[in-house]
Image: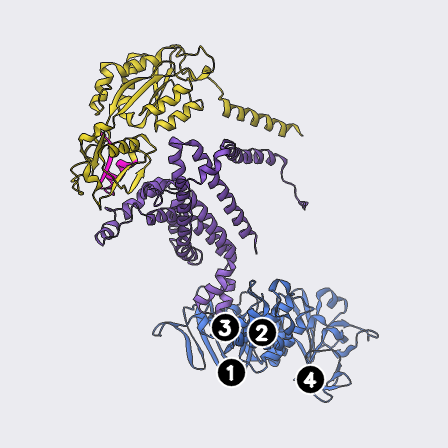
Amino acid sequence: MSVEVEFFTAERDVGAALRVAAGETVALLGPNGSGKSTVLGVLAGLVRPDTGRVSIDGEVLTDIGPGSSGRMVAPHARRTALLGQDALLFPHLDALENVAFGPRSRGTHRRTARAEAQGWLEAVGVGELGRRRPGELSGGQAQRVAVARALAADPRVLLLDEPMAALDVTVQPSLRQVLRRVLADRTAVIVTHDPLDALLLADRVVVLEAGRVVEEGVSKDVLSRPRSAFGARLAGLNLVRGTWRDDAVEAEQLVVHGLIEGEAPSIGDAVIAAFRPQAVAVYREKVRGSPRNTFLVVVSEVEPRGDLVRVHAGDLVADVTVQAAADLELVQGSAVTFSVKATEVSVYGI
Amino acid sequence: MKQQRPVDLPRWVYLPALVGAAFVLLPLVAVVAKVDWPSFLDLVTSEDSRAAFWLSLRTSLASTAACIVLGVPMAMVLARWDFRYLGVLRSLVLLPLVLPPVVGGLALLYTFGRRGLLGQSLDAMGIQIAFSTIAVVMAQTFVALPFLVVSLEGSLRTAGDRYEVAAASLGASPTTVFRRITLPLVLPGLVSGAVLAFARALGEFGATITFAGSLQGRTRTLPLEIYLQRETDPDAAVALALVLLVFAVLVIGFARQGRGAV
Amino acid sequence: MSSRPRRALLATAVLSVCLTAGCGGDDGSGASGDEGTTLTVYAAASLTQTFEAIGAEFEKQHDGVTVEFSFGGSSDLVSQIQEGAPADVFASADTANMDKLTGEDLQAADPQYFATNTLEIAVPPGNPGAVRSFADLAKAGLNVVVCAPEVPCGAAAVKVEEATGVDIAPVSEEQSVTDVLAKVTSGEADAGLVYVTDVIAAGDDVEGIAFAESAEAVNTYPIAALKDASDRDSPDSSDSSGLAQAFVDLVMSAEGQQILADAGFAPAG
C-alpha cells in the first residue's frame, strides 16, 4: 500500500510532496500552521488542493490541475481512516458499536461486525469496555477505542493527527505503546509535535515549515542531527545507542538509565536511549547523589538560541538559560557534568 | 432540588417575568373559568366537535409528516451548504413565519387553486386540491414547515460536522452518515421541531379557511369549528377551545421532554 | 436599595389598571356636544360602504362630531358590546343578534328595521359552471360554496333550500359572505350564495343571478341607539346626547334610504 501525494493549495499556501512505502510509517513534524494537517486533509479527501495528485498503490484518488482528470474521490471511498486529537466517538453508540461502525458501513453483517469490533477492542487493550457509552470512558480509553475504530475500518492508510495531544501526559506512554504495536507493519502518516513520538512510532520523518518540506530522512538521523531550524529547535534529541546490560544502555563511554518504552529488551539487545536537551542539567562540579545519569563532558560549542543557550558536548546537547550559562562561565573547552534524571529518558529496542 | 446559582439574576427581572407569565396564563385561566362544566362533555362530544377533532388530529399528523419529509432535507441544506446567497434563501424559506396566515392561504390559492400557477395544469389533469382535506394539510404544512426547519437547523449547526467527517473517514457513504450519525445526533432537535410544527398545524386557522374552505369532516378543523361555533353557541366554542388548549399543553410538555433528552 | 423594585411594582400596577379600566381622558362617546365629540357606530360588515357614506353625511350635518365605525360580523359585535365596548349605535345584519341586546336591556330605544337584503347566486365572470337557476346548484360536479348554517347568510340559504326542496351539497360552508365571495372571485367555486348587495359591491369580479326563491329568506337589518357605555348599569341610563338617535334617524331618512338602495338594499317592510 504505497502512498504518493503531491499538491499545492494557494489558500493555505501549502505545497508538499510525500511518499510513503508500503508498511512504512511517516511522521510529519513541524510548528503550528506549517501545513501538517493540510497534508492529511488532502490525503483523506477533505481538502481539495488547487493542483495535486494523490494515489494509493497506483489508484488515483485526487488528480487536479491543468491537464489532469479533475478526479476527486469522496472521503468515504478512499479507505484512509483519520484519527484526530479528539476521539470523536459517536456519543449515541456504545464503544463496541463505534468500532463496528466501519465494518457495518462496508456492508458487513451486524453480528460479524460486532465480533470483529470486539477483536479490535481487545487488540488495543479495552476489550471489557464494549458496552460503555463514550461519556463513560476516560480520555485515554476513548482514544484507544478510536484507534480500534480506525483499524476496524480496514484502511489502506491510517492517518493520525496528533493522536496524543489532547491526552494527559500520564496516559500518553500506554497509548504510545498501543500505537507502536498497531503501526509496526502498517502504512501510516502521523502528524505530531513530539519528536519522541516521531522517533518511537515512525520509520521516517518529514519536517514541514511554512507549508514546505524542509527536511526528511530516517527518524533517528533527522531527530539526532537535524539540519532544519525547526528540526533543531524542537527535535535535537539526545540519542544514545548502545546495548542493553545491567538494566541500562551501555554505550562507548556512557551508561544511561531510563524508562523502558514497550517490551523489555533482553541482555545484549541493541537499544537507544532518548532524552530532550531541556531535561539535561549542567554543573561545573561532579555531581553525587540522586540523578543516576551523570556524564563528564567537554563543551565543544556554545550556541545562543534566544532565551536559551544550547551547549554541545560531542553528540550530547543540553539547553540551559542564558543566566545559567553566564554563571557557569561556559565556553568551548569547559569541563562540565551533564546530568539527567532517569525518568526523563526513554529507552526502546531498535 | 434547588440549585444555587453562582451568579444571581438581577432582582428586577422577577417582576416583569411575573407580569409576563400572568399575561400569558391569565387568559388561559379565563377560558377555563368560562367553561360550562355541566354540559362540557356533551359539548365536546357532539358530532360536530368529534368530526372537527379527528380531522384536526389527522391533518396535523399528516402535515407534521410532510414537514419532516420536506423540512429535514431543507434544514440540512441550510445548515451544511455554504454558498453566497444562503442567507437570502434562508429568509425566503422562513417567510411563512412572518406572513399572516391568511396571506399564506391566498398565496397557496394563487398557486394550487383552479386558476393558479400550477393549479391550472392540475385541474386539466382532473386533480382538484381546493376544498379537499389535502388542501388543509397543505395549508398546515405551509405555515408549520419553517418551525421545523428553524429548530432543526439550529440543532444541526450546534452538532457541527465533526462526527460526520469522522464517519465518512471510516468509509460510511453520505446516506449512511445521515442515517446512522446525523439523524440520531439531532434527534432531540428533530422531535422538538416536529412537535412545534404539529402544534402550529393544530392551531392553524387563517391559511386553512382561505385555501381549503370549511366543511364538516373534510376541511373544518378544530380552530375553524371553534370560530364557527362562537357565532351561535359560545359555550361550545369555549369547551372546544379548552380541548385544544389541553392538547397543546400536552404537546408542549412532550416537546420539552424531547429537548431535555440527551 | 429596595425602593427600586417597589417603584417598578407601582408603575406596573398603574399600568395594569390602565389596561383594564382605561386611563386618561374619556374619548367623549355620548358626551354633550363639545368640539371633538365622537360617535361610535358598530355595524354589520355588509354595511361598510353604505354606512361610511351615511357617516360622512352625518358629520357634514353635525359640526365637530366625528363618526367612528367598527365593522364586523354581527355576532362578534354583539359579544364585544356585551363585554362593554363603547358603542353608541348598533346596526345588525339580522334580528337574532339584535335580540341578544334586547334581552340584556342595552338599548336606549327600540330597534328599527332600516333595510332588507336577499340572496343571489354569484358566479365567476363567464359563468363557467353554466348556472341558470337555484335548482342548478344541486348539479353534481359543481363547486358550490355557501355560508355555514350558523351564520345569518347560511341560515338564509338553508331556509331557501327547505322551502324549495333543492338539496345543495356545498364543497365548503364559509364563515362569512366575504369568504364565500372570495372563493367565487378567485374561481375556486363555480357558484356561491351571497347577498344582492355583495354582488353589486363586487362589481365586475362576479356575475349575479337573481332567483325568485330568494323571497323565502329575506334578511331584515335592525338598528338601535345604545345606552351610554359608561353607565349602562344604572336604570335611567340613556342616549344622553341624542346623537346616537340622530344617526339612527339619518339612516331611516329618505337620504339614508337612497344610499342603501343604491347599494342594492331593499327597504324594510
Give the distance between the C-alpha atoms of the residues marked 1 and 4, in whole angstroms. Answer: 25 Å
- Residue of label 4: A271
Q: Is residue C65 above or below residue C157?
A: above
Q: Nearer the viewer, mark 1 or mark 2?
A: 2
Q: Are marks 3 and 2 in contact (CB under 8 Å)?
A: no
Q: Residue at x 34, y 18 (%)?
A: C67
Q: Earlier in the sequence, mark 4 or mark 3?
A: 3
Q: Colour of chain B?
A: purple
Which shade of the palette goes to chain A?
blue
Label 2 is found on which chain of the structure? A
**Residue C109 badge:** none
Alpha carbon separation for disc pair 4 and 3: 42 Å
* Furthest-bottom residue in this view: A268
The front one of A321 and C219 is: C219
Mark 3 Cα shell of 10 Å, populated few (<14), some (14-19), many (≥20):
many
Which residue does the numbered mark 3 point to in the structure image? A104
Decide which of tag 1 and tag 4 comes sooner along the chain: 1
> Which stretch did the figure color magenta?
C179-195
Q: Which residue is identified by label 2?
A: A148
Q: Are marks 3 and 1 on the same chain?
A: yes
- Name the element at disc 4: strand
Q: Is residue C187 magenta?
A: yes
Q: Which mark is residue A21?
A: 1
Compared with B23, A320 (above or below) is below
Q: Give the spatial CA distance, label 1 vs label 2.
A: 23 Å
Q: Quadrant of residue C108?
A: top left
Disc 4 marks a residue whose amino acid type is Val
Q: Gap between marks 3 and 2, in whole Å?
A: 14 Å
Name which residue type carries label 2: Ala
* Kind of element beneath mark 1: loop
Q: Is residue C166 left or right of residue A52?
A: left
